[in-house]
Image (cartoon, coloured by chain):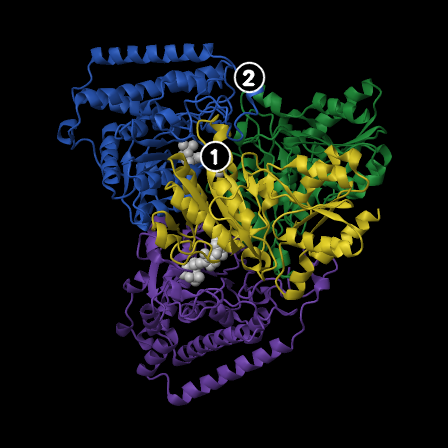
Chain colours: A blue, B purple, C yellow, D green
Amino acid sequence: MSAREAKAVKSPVERTPQTLGVHDRELLEMYYYVRLARAVDERMWALQRSGQAAFVISGQGHEGAQVGTVFALDRDKDWLVPFYRSVAAVLVKGMPPAEIFLIQLSKATDPSSGGRQMPGHYGHSGHKILSTSSPVTTQLLHADGIAYAAKLRGTGEVCVTEVGEGATSEGDFHEALNFAAIHRLGVIFLVENNGYAISVPLSKQMAVPNVSARAVGYGIPGVTVDGSHVLDVYVAAREAVARARRGDGPTLLEVNVPRLTAHSSDDRQEKYRSADEIRHTKEHDPVHVFAGELRAWGVLTDAREQEIAERVRRAVDEGTEIAEAAPAVDPATATRYVYYEHNAPPGRGR
Amino acid sequence: MSAREAKAVKSPVERTPQTLGVHDRELLEMYYYVRLARAVDERMWALQRSGQAAFVISGQGHEGAQVGTVFALDRDKDWLVPFYRSVAAVLVKGMPPAEIFLIQLSKATDPSSGGRQMPGHYGHSGHKILSTSSPVTTQLLHADGIAYAAKLRGTGEVCVTEVGEGATSEGDFHEALNFAAIHRLGVIFLVENNGYAISVPLSKQMAVPNVSARAVGYGIPGVTVDGSHVLDVYVAAREAVARARRGDGPTLLEVNVPRLTAHSSDDRQEKYRSADEIRHTKEHDPVHVFAGELRAWGVLTDAREQEIAERVRRAVDEGTEIAEAAPAVDPATATRYVYYEHNAPPGRGR
Amino acid sequence: MADKRYLDAIHDALHEEMARDERVVVLGEDVGRKGGVFGVTDGLFEAFGEDRVVDTPLAESMIIGVSVGMAANGLIPVPEIQFADFIHPAFDQIVSEVARMRYRSNNDYGCPMTIRVPYGGGVHGALYHSQSIEAFYAHVPGLKVVAPYSPADAKGLLKAAIRDHDPVLYLEHKKLYRMIHDQVPDGDVDVPVGHAAVRRPGRDLSIFAYGLMMHEALGAADLLARDGIEAEVVDLRTLRPLDTATILDSVARTSRALIVHEDNRFGGFGAEVAATIAEEGFRHLDAPPTRVCGPDVPAVPFAPPLEQWFMPNAEKIAAAARTLVAY
Amino acid sequence: MADKRYLDAIHDALHEEMARDERVVVLGEDVGRKGGVFGVTDGLFEAFGEDRVVDTPLAESMIIGVSVGMAANGLIPVPEIQFADFIHPAFDQIVSEVARMRYRSNNDYGCPMTIRVPYGGGVHGALYHSQSIEAFYAHVPGLKVVAPYSPADAKGLLKAAIRDHDPVLYLEHKKLYRMIHDQVPDGDVDVPVGHAAVRRPGRDLSIFAYGLMMHEALGAADLLARDGIEAEVVDLRTLRPLDTATILDSVARTSRALIVHEDNRFGGFGAEVAATIAEEGFRHLDAPPTRVCGPDVPAVPFAPPLEQWFMPNAEKIAAAARTLVAY
Ligand SMILES: Cc1ncc(C[n+]2csc(CCOP(=O)(O)OP(=O)(O)O)c2C)c(N)n1
Ligand SMILES: Cc1ncc(C[n+]2csc(CCOP(=O)(O)OP(=O)(O)O)c2C)c(N)n1
Ligand SMILES: [Mg+2]
Ligand SMILES: [Mg+2]
């Protein structure tokens, strides 16, 4: 996994939360979300294994990258254009676990699609999360458009969009970075590099060890951060957001992360990844690395750990109950909203 | 025209044909082709103005870039995947002027398409020039495939493909460089940067002054050369071809060139380019710059100049006569070759 | 009311809509300083500035993909694709994103935009500057597709498209730009999306067409009238949603249907029109629903004899009509 | 002869063709070490090496564009697009380059390749893993399009496609991979491109289908037989070039045509079949050529009740057939 071997730009040992101006409260809240995302994610797989969902795709290992980045946003004002691993990102952006489970169980009240899309296709106008599709990389151009509109309308909004390293091989990646650079748009292109695109390793995806090497070709900053070190991600994202907010343009923010599961519930990764490698990957689990760092910094204690674990457990259980109790989709609704309807219920949507 | 202002990587004054191991004979042959291409090009416009062709698109100003590059190829063995400005490139690759005029006049014996495509869409299997279409940038991936086949079959062929700087904004550019880099394919991506995509200036096309800045993001060499200095182009291309032949992979070779005409016969460039700028552009005309250099090096004399001028005149006139005398397309052939035909005449084609 | 070319009518609609609603933005290759390769957007750059009339990089997927994001964040984009032949790199953005945004989000997001696309042959454009693309896009649920034939319709339909809550593919025929001119009302012109129009009534057969081919169909009707054949000519105008009521009404009157388009015949848009007539108008038909289309070779070959061979015209239409009436 | 699943038949054809002709190369996302996301290319990587079984970057335009160049320089590429829904980024390369290479070069270059594309619904794939794409591509002159329904046809048509001088879009239905198995000859199977097949003879109506829908059509014929209605079931197999002779022959016998596909109805491939029957078989028809198709919403929505609602099946086909026979 050569991306993993690439040296992180910043080392966590030299920098402390204090010198970086990050409060304990914020760190603990980040930790809560990292743990919440992991617990929600594990519940998604449990729901799939129990036969309540046909499919699951999720983000175990990516939590640090997403929490660190989305924490740097103004969560009411800014936009998120996610992808299928964005469990942690959408949680931080405002989706409660119940909404994620409604999506996972394809219930009528699934807020992203009303049960129309596969699980993992997040979207929610109320949280300023754009609706996403399955074809990879298209969303980067949508992020550009959102940021262009923000600039033209003078709203000051910033937009984070997420994509895997494999998906950066699509032409839309190039076209999106180029357009954002020309117009100095307030977009953060968050590349979550887990070293694989399903089975295809980084070495067959590109001839460079880091996606961030591409930034210079667009005249924008590119950084690579280790996603196990959540604080590093946060600091890098904070800089990128500040730059975007100032009108100084986009940042290519690559975060190296471990993929702790198979690609999806349809994949068997043992075919293309050695047992050894899979074991090794776990060393970079952001939940454990971050917890260790927080303890070393004196931020996390046993009592706080337990408190957070309890909060997480409650949130996940309550969310699951709400989703399980929600009604199934009525096929009579299947023809709705191919086009705009004048008689549509007001409220959500535009 | 900011591309033009970017400093060329190599300066001609420090380097002479002697130190570079380039013989007078080769230089004069290059000069012949530069002049021939210009004369063919001017004739193409004349044929259009006289009403014999509905359209012309050509390469005035690009001759140095193309002659310098294609001269570095083994013209029998290697491939050219051209674009619509490739007048000089296809001449060097083996197309006689008559064939170019048959294409320009859309005659039945137009070797590229039998009058089916617009002028400027070169192709010829006999000369190992791939057939080209109008949508820009698609051809870069074809060059990859040709080079991949060469590698797999062990033929040692190298492939040059040409593209404008505007067309590098298409996703196919990114996808082609990436694939070529991963497989270390013998492709030279020749970007002829004339500072405009029809009316769109470089500053609205990308946020970097040079396309070659993108090479590092693919892990391949990228160079920028001034196309008025034909020897510099040749030397850079020779290096790129040697690298390709060794199996060391592709090169992104950007050549800055002036666009000495409007985009095509359908364009009026006065709308978006100042008279001053158009005048300035002429200073970089490779015909004159190269002639001046050859004289300074003592390679070109009045006698040789006249001899070459005479050779060019004859070639262009003879070619025009052949093309004008050729038969028009018979509409009865219009349904042929949508699919393979078992009864097709043997010979050309595969 | 003033005499305007097709091109001017499109230009005026753009100008008026941009002046009316500051959310409207135009983007595409060469649409700014040059005013478009056909001159349609001429003057908009000067009137509304480079932020609302955006000269984009050469990348069609980008043009449409950026428009999706603009629409999500409160703008009303009017992207231009320079030639219909070059819309293909944006196929994924249009089919997967633009067309499905509302359905997939269960109405949480719409995707209002008008994609302007110069299309069609007869302009010495050859294989890659002549293409018709309506069959590809009219097949896609979530998109609307219009193809005006007159200056007044061009203006009215463009205004309607820009004001529509849904994405509209607006097909403008390149050959009509300067070929035709006609009276166009000042300001708004009421041509809602979704309605066909009977342009010439007749009793012997119905000819269905759109865009440039409407002019050839009307020419054919003139030729036929000399032989005493009264052709009804129906302008489809909106290809999706298709106005099947007007189509079937006409067939109920004439019992014979001739469908005309310049796109390739096999799997072309005419197949849907013919299939709909056959399926829903079967009891009215006295003869097979018949198509006059471009032949099944790639777009329009270049050399003048080839181009002429390719394009349907009044004579070819009239000949098919005579056969149909004699059935 | 051995009992094989649809999936195995495709795999065997690939393996045998690669062994027979070293010019054949397979390329696509995850086709190598993983053996494809459906397992179709399992073992090829080990048998033929990474240079002939290429795990490509995640870029469909690249996969097809590179194949064009390979074909020009003496290889016979068999690119795989992981899901039909993800072929759209390659639309330009397929329509502008692959399909037109021979015509535009006046036969100077061909473009032999077989693009393998898993397509179709009923597999809990939702909007973006269920799509049918035949209407888009069958419309394009220069392409051939096939869609086998049985293991033997899957093997035979894939071998024929790989040996064809022209580009073939090979549509394999994802749901059939493991759903069906049947006797498949060892080695070559003679199923030339371009021929439909009557799978069940009947006198009361003709049902035309392909791919997964053939199985539903045959199921419908069973249901209808219980009511004494004898349906002839015709497997189109090759969508382009379409075997109109076999289609018209069947309609001449039964006088009634029912066309079935799971793709959206409006502008779908069935429109061409219906239009052809209406136009060329008019005098044989006793009832309107009728279509049973997926409804006009984007692909197949996910939740089981929605998926069921979307997919045509034996019951829906039989119901339409009864209406048609009673016409
Ligand atoms: C256009 C397109 N092609 C193929 C796919 C199938 N697919 C889904 S995810 C995936 C791999 C993505 O890898 P990467 O971008 O690295 O993200 P990761 O899953 O590793 O987080 C592929 C090939 C797709 N969704 N879209
Ligand atoms: C996909 C596509 N989009 C648009 C066009 C129309 N077009 C033809 S040439 C051109 C500009 C190309 O600029 P550049 O690549 O810089 O090459 P140059 O003409 O300057 O040599 C455009 C927009 C096209 N041919 N193909
Ligand atoms: Mg990955
Ligand atoms: Mg240029």
Question: Can residue C296 be spotted in the picture?
Answer: no
Other residues around mark 1 within 10 Å, as few (<14) / some (14–19) / many (≥20): some
Q: Regarding mark 1 in the picture, which secondary structure is present there?
A: loop
Q: Is mark 2 within 8 Å of ligand 1?
A: no
**Lateral position of residue B220 relative to residue C211, left or right:** left
Give the quadrant of ligand 4.
Answer: bottom left
How much space separates mark 2 and mark 1, taking CA atoms?
A: 25 Å
Q: Regarding mark 2 in the picture, which secondary structure is present there?
A: loop
Q: How many marks?
A: 2
Residue drawn where x is 34% and y is 44% of the image: A180
Task: Report the residue that reaches farthest toward the left.
Answer: A19
Of the numbered discs in the image, which one, if any, rests on residue A202? none
Q: Are marks 2 and 1 on the same chain?
A: no
Q: Reply above or below: D244 against B169.
A: above
Q: Residue C33 at what x, y percent from top left?
A: 38, 57
Q: Residue B197 at what x, y percent from top left?
A: 41, 59
Residue C309 occupies quadrant: bottom right
Of the numbered discs in the image, which one, if any, rests on residue C165? 1
**Lateral position of residue A262 relative to residue D279, left or right:** left
Q: Is mark 1 within 8 Å of ligand 1?
A: no
Residue drawn where x is 36% and y is 47% of the image: C52
**Lateral position of residue A42 relative to residue A78, left or right:** right
Between residue C68 and residue A301, name the one nearer to us.
Answer: C68
Q: Reply above or below: A70 against B51.
A: above
Q: Which residue position holds label 2?
A: A330
Between residue A210 and residue B88, name the one nearer to us.
Answer: B88
Residue A104 occupies quadrant: top left
Other residues around mark 2 within 10 Å, as few (<14) / some (14–19) / many (≥20): some
Q: Residue D63 at what x, y percent from top left?
A: 52, 45
Task: Report the residue that reaches farthest toward the bottom.
Answer: B303
Residue type for callout 2: Asp
Q: Residue A63 at what x, y percent from top left?
A: 33, 26
